[in-house]
Amino acid sequence: MKLIAPLGMAALVSACAASPSGNDLTRRSAVVVDGQTYDIGQLTESTWTALSRADAGNIGSAATGTAHRGAVLQAIERASGCKVTDSDYSLQGRQLDAQVDCAGRLKN
């Protein structure tokens, strides 16, 4: 019986590690921006993300340009229904995280 409790706890910890807490990317949508595919989804109540797929370039690179970055941010606004107020890159520029303001929902 004493072995069952540690095994049960190990299984519980593994399950928690496999599904990130507060991460809503299970409900994500694939969006194509300038021919590049991104998975867009909600990370927290006020943070959304666009993650480039393997075939997409680096969102943060100089070659991608600010117009492309702006188009990705617009895609986040459409998906979230909220206004992007700030953004930053992570995962070596493959992921663009955007802080959104949903209090004054976009009037699209």
Image (cartoon, grey):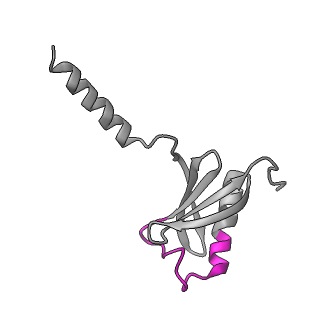
Percent position (x, y) of residue 39?
53, 59
Q: Is residue 19 left or right of residue 61?
A: left
Q: Which residues are magenta?
A: 52-71
Percent position (x, y) of residue 26?
50, 45
Residue under the point 16% across and 17% down:
2
* Furthest residue toward bottom: 63
* Furthest residue toward right: 107
Characterize the magenta stretch by its predominant secondary structure: loop
Q: Is residue 54 above or below residue 106?
A: below
Q: Is residue 103 above or below residue 15?
A: below
Q: Is residue 49 above or below residue 18?
A: below
Label tally: 0
Residue under the point 66% across and 66% down:
73
Q: Is residue 6 magenta?
A: no
Percent position (x, y) of residue 4?
19, 19
Q: Nearer the viewer, residue 13 or 52?
A: 13
In which quarter of the view is residue 75 placed?
bottom right
* Furthest residue toward top: 1
Q: Quadrant of the C terminus?
A: bottom right
Q: Is residue 98 above or below residue 11?
A: below
Residue under the point 25% across and 31% down:
10
Q: Is residue 57 left or right of residue 76?
A: left
Percent position (x, y) of residue 104?
82, 50
